[in-house]
Amino acid sequence: MPFDQLKRREFISLIGGVAAAWPLGARAQQPAKLPTIGFLGSTTPSGQSQWTAAFVQQLRELGWIEGRTVAIQYRWAEGRSERYAEFVAKFVRLKVDVIVTVGAAVDAAKQATAVIPIVFAVAGDPVGSGLVASLARPGGNVTGLSLQNTDLAGKRLELLREVVPGLRRFAILGNIGYRGAELEMNEIQEAARKLALEVDMLEIRRAEDIAPVFEAVKGRADALYVVPDALVSTYRIRINTLVLGARLPTMYNFREYVEGGGLMSYGPNFADLFRRAAEFVDKILRGTKPADIPVEQPTKFDLVINLTTAKAIGLKIPETFLLRADEVIE
């Protein structure tokens, strides 16, 4: 065979070999898929901004930097619980590595998948509601942080009595469509009976129910106890406006309501809970199974008072009470 023809054959073989090998090399150089967190917020981005920021910051400190070492898919239900199933189904289709959410959304996530790990940053009674088998041994694919709401009801009522002289009758506002809120409302009633306090129940299921229940209780109650959930949190400004109009001293479970004009709150620090939820996610992304991560409980509690609101409703807060507060908003 002539030398030049032989060289042409070798050249063609070489080019063919390179062409065949190129896709494999290109695929090998493509960046690996980042571990992905499905973050389902029950309210709005602005409504949970402090909690989300605490979560992301703690992830960063643990080496999970959004966009570089981890991806986060955010979805916001805006207080509409009927959207939970839709968003969780999306996470399942995306094959996220872990789902992070709160409250009633955890139930939707558990119903949608028994495989993808689920971390609840906030849950009222995870054992009683069937999310986990026990706090020490959650089992299954769900774990997180329990709020212990039922253990705090009596303490909140005691605090309310301290700032409302002659408290005899109060109202409880809560979304009866959320099992966690219903359980807490029952516990508050039980605590009220022990303190010989009368109770009016203000049951809501949607935003349109809020204004009418305030009309029904006007002039009947000395104070109000608001039970939080996604619906109540989304419309907390509307609730606070109605509270001010009715001049009702109001107890909430966490500080964000007081920052929005509520009188006072006592309960777990939610930003701290979301920071700790990031630690759960870190363990899961590094290979630990949710079933082997015990459910934890709050360790940081805050008493927050809004003095501007107290003045607006004509309530004098004792100086000794203010000194005990973790924060006084003026």
Image (cartoon, grey):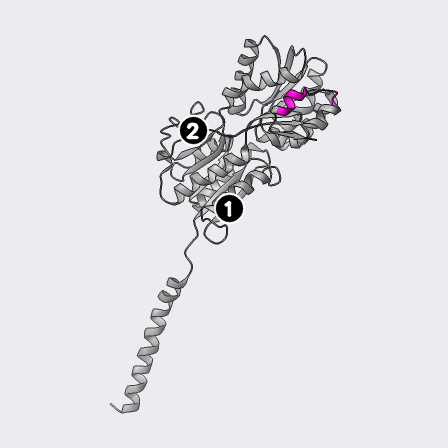
- Amino acid at pointer 1: Gln
Horizontal side of 62 relative to 199 (left or right) equals left
Q: Mark 1 points at which residue?
A: 73
Are the residues tagged 2 and 1 within 8 Å (C-beta)?
no
Q: Residue furthest top?
A: 196
| Residue 140 % position (x, y) | 36, 33
Q: Name which residue lies at 60% across and 36% down.
A: 78
Horizontal side of 287 relative to 327 (left or right) equals left
Image height of 30 relative to 257, above or below: below
Q: What element carries label 2?
A: loop
Question: In which quarter of the view is residue 158 placed?
Answer: top right
Q: Which range of residues does the magenta coloring cover? A: 312-323
Q: Name which residue lies at 36% across and 38% down.
A: 289
Label 2 neighbourhood size at 10 Å, few (<14), some (14-19), many (20+)? many
Mark sitting on residue 131: 2
Along the line of sight, the residue nearer the viewer: 238 or 165: 165
Image height of 4 relative to 114, above or below: below
Image height of 249 relative to 117, above or below: above
| Residue 228 % position (x, y) | 58, 27
93 magenta-colored = no
| Residue 270 % position (x, y) | 54, 33
Task: Please identify the quadrant where the N terminus is shown.
Answer: bottom left
